[in-house]
């Protein structure tokens, strides 16, 4: 009956968590009062909370000997349960604290390491610019080839280190490495080409900026006409290029070649949207004779251009294949192959950036690539440049 009475009395079981007592006064009277309530099965949740937080009070009540065996057992059970829960709670708090400290420490170390990586990237970028200047000065002064080769080898080694570190950087942190806005735009374009191991030569950056100033200044109206005509032809060009797995950025070749004028004719006899010479047009399936000239057919000319660009990328596959293909579209693949054959170490240096840096391209081709890149930047950032 005593056990049943205790178990059925809801007031014996606290309905809310016990909180530690802040006031330690009145121990004697409080202990007697709680003991009296225990004996008469009248203890409530608040009293139990007060009692469970003080080990000496529980021991004092049990030492009085006024409780029945069942009541003593209940008090002992409640006390053990309370302290078990309290210890579990403290263990959880300790675990959370340890996890928090470890996590904070881990991310602090990672942030420190990342900051060092960023600083190293900035340092290597300055070194690359220094090597670029030394190579340019050595070429201008007619230095011995061995001296130029030594500088190029040092440059290549530093470039490899820089590009390895750059891969670990977040894109939003590029502006702390690339201070120049145009260089940031160029890096975004080159990353879409799949370029991963390069450094933009200062002369390339300078020429891209020059052509941007031309297209936004004296040639501004011409550039606006390019952008207006683009809306008519880009959807078709993009569809053909997508079907042939070609980078859509190569569409800008047509913008530069003809300004999207299907009847454009060059002084050399190139015709149409893609400015095919007669023999190249025929090689890629276009009819060019006294009666019909399919170079002026936008759809057929674009299909031929896609086939030609696919062949160029296949020929110059590997490092900088897109850049080499664009250069070959202007100069012809034979001239680009000839420039590549002049590389001393083709296993290491067979790429567009090397032959551009070493001035192995014709002047027209040296200007052709910066013009295309300038048009890409302007079209993709029209609002920035006031279009």
Image (cartoon, rainbow, N blue to C red):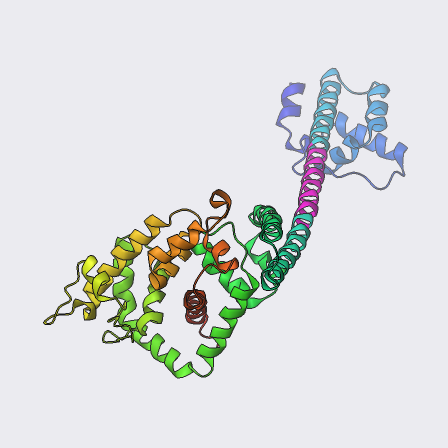
Dominant SS type (magenta): helix
Residue 385 horizontal side relative to residue 10, left or right? left
Which is nearer the eye, 33 or 339?
A: 339
Please count the marks in the image.
0
Residue 321 position, x and y percent, is: 40, 52
Residue 197 position, x and y percent, is: 51, 49
| Above or below: residue 168 compared with residue 35 | below
- Looking at the image, which residue is at 39% across and 78% down? 223
Residue 331 horizontal side relative to residue 105, left or right? left
Residue 370 in sight in this render? yes
Which is nearer the eye, 129 or 349?
A: 349
- Looking at the image, which residue is at 35% across and 75% down? 227
| Above or below: residue 46 compared with residue 289 | above
Q: Quadrant of the N terminus?
A: top right
Residue 324 position, x and y percent, is: 40, 56
Residue 331 horizontal side relative to residue 299, left or right? right
Residue 386 in sight in this render? no
Residue reaching furthest left? 291
Which is nearer the eye, 296 or 39?
A: 296
Q: Quadrant of residue 271?
A: bottom left
- Looking at the image, which residue is at 61% across and 58% down? 143
Q: Quadrant of residue 189?
A: bottom left
Q: Is residue 272 magenta?
A: no
Which is nearer the eye, 288 or 314?
A: 288
Residue 306 position, x and y percent, is: 27, 57
Q: Is residue 94 magenta?
A: yes
Q: Quadrant of residue 379?
A: bottom left
Q: Which residues are magenta?
A: 92-115
Q: Quadrant of the C terminus?
A: bottom left
């Amino acid at each position: 009956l005593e056990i049943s009475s205790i178990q059925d009395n809801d007031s014996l079981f606290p309905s809310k968590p016990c909180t530690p007592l802040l006031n330690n006064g009145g121990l004697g009277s409080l202990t007697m009062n709680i003991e009296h309530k225990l004996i008469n099965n009248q203890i409530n949740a608040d009293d139990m909370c007060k009692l469970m937080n003080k080990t000496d009070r529980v021991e004092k009540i049990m030492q009085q000997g006024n409780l029945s065996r069942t009541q003593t057992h209940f008090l002992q059970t409640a006390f053990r349960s309370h302290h078990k829960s309290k210890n579990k709670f403290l263990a959880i708090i300790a675990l959370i604290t340890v996890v928090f400290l470890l996590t904070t420490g881990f991310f602090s170390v990672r942030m420190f390491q990342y900051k060092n990586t960023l600083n190293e990237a900035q340092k290597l970028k300055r070194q690359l610019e220094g090597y670029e200047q030394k190579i340019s000065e050595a070429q201008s002064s007619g230095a011995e080839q061995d001296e130029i080769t030594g500088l190029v080898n040092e440059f290549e080694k530093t470039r490899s280190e820089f590009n390895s570190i750059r891969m670990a950087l977040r894109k939003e942190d590029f502006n702390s490495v690339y201070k120049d806005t145009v260089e940031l735009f160029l890096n975004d374009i080159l990353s879409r080409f799949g370029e991963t191991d390069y450094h933009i030569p200062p002369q390339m950056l300078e020429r891209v900026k020059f052509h941007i100033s031309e297209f936004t200044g004296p040639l501004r109206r011409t550039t606006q006409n390019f952008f207006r005509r683009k809306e008519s032809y880009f959807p078709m060009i993009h569809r053909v290029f997508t079907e042939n797995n070609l980078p859509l950025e190569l569409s800008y070749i047509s913008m530069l070649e003809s300004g999207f004028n299907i009847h454009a004719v060059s002084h050399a006899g190139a015709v149409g949207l893609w400015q095919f010479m007669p023999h190249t047009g025929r090689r890629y399936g276009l009819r060019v004779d006294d009666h019909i000239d399919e170079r002026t057919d936008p759809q057929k000319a674009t299909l031929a251009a896609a086939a030609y660009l696919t062949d160029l990328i296949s020929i110059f596959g590997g490092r900088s294949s897109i850049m080499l293909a664009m250069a070959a579209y202007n100069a012809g693949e034979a001239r680009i192959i000839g420039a590549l054959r002049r590389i001393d170490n083709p296993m290491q240096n067979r790429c567009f950036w090397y032959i551009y840096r070493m001035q192995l391209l014709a002047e027209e081709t040296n200007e052709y690539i910066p013009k295309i890149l300038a048009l890409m930047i302007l079209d993709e950032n029209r609002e920035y440049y006031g279009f």
